[in-house]
Image: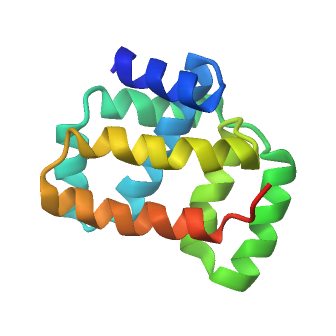
Amino acid sequence: MDEILKSLAQHTGIDVATARTALGAVMTFLKEHLPEGVSGQLMSAVPESQGLVTSFDQNKTGGGLLGMVTGMATKVFGGDTSKLLDMLGKSGLSLTQVHAFLPKALELLKQHLPAEVAEKISGLVSGALAAAPKA
């Protein structure tokens, strides 16, 4: 997991602790939005997945500007896609960082997942990225 977090931090320009919290936000979102069996496969396949979820729960903040933007996005796109954006804002990411972080996080997560699980999470994460306004 340390290599995944270092890669995310380097690619996004954030520190490793923020990368851990942000990846925890993604894992929490996926755990809440995938069917139970698929969610279980995800949590089993990704190293330290429960620790990531705990990191997000313990370190989330108010969300700042990204929180306000996602509030507007909720009205336009609905709750699910903007919820992930809100969670990433609470993990300490800016809008610019979200655009760098999400594709890389998805790429790294897919390396640990069965193809059918990877396909399901791609749809959820890609929808959130599409809903995120460009910085």
Report whether 69 appears left or right of 112. right
Residue 101 screen position, x and y as percent: 56, 41
96 or 85, nearer to the observer = 96
The answer to whether 23 is drawn above or below residue 55 in the figure is: below
Please state, as top left, top right, bottom left or bottom right, where the C terminus lies in the image: bottom right
Please state, as top left, top right, bottom left or bottom right, where the N terminus lies in the image: top left
The image quadrant of residue 79 is: bottom right
The answer to whether 117 is drawn above or below residue 101 in the figure is: below
Residue 15 screen position, x and y as percent: 63, 18
What is the basis of the colouring in this image? Answer: rainbow
The answer to whether 83 is drawn above or below residue 11 in the figure is: below
Report whether 62 appears left or right of 107. right
Residue 52 screen position, x and y as percent: 42, 31
Query: What's the residue at 48%, 49% (across, down)?
Result: 103
Query: What's the residue at 57%, 62% (across, down)?
Result: 129
Query: What's the residue at 25%, 28% (across, down)?
Result: 47
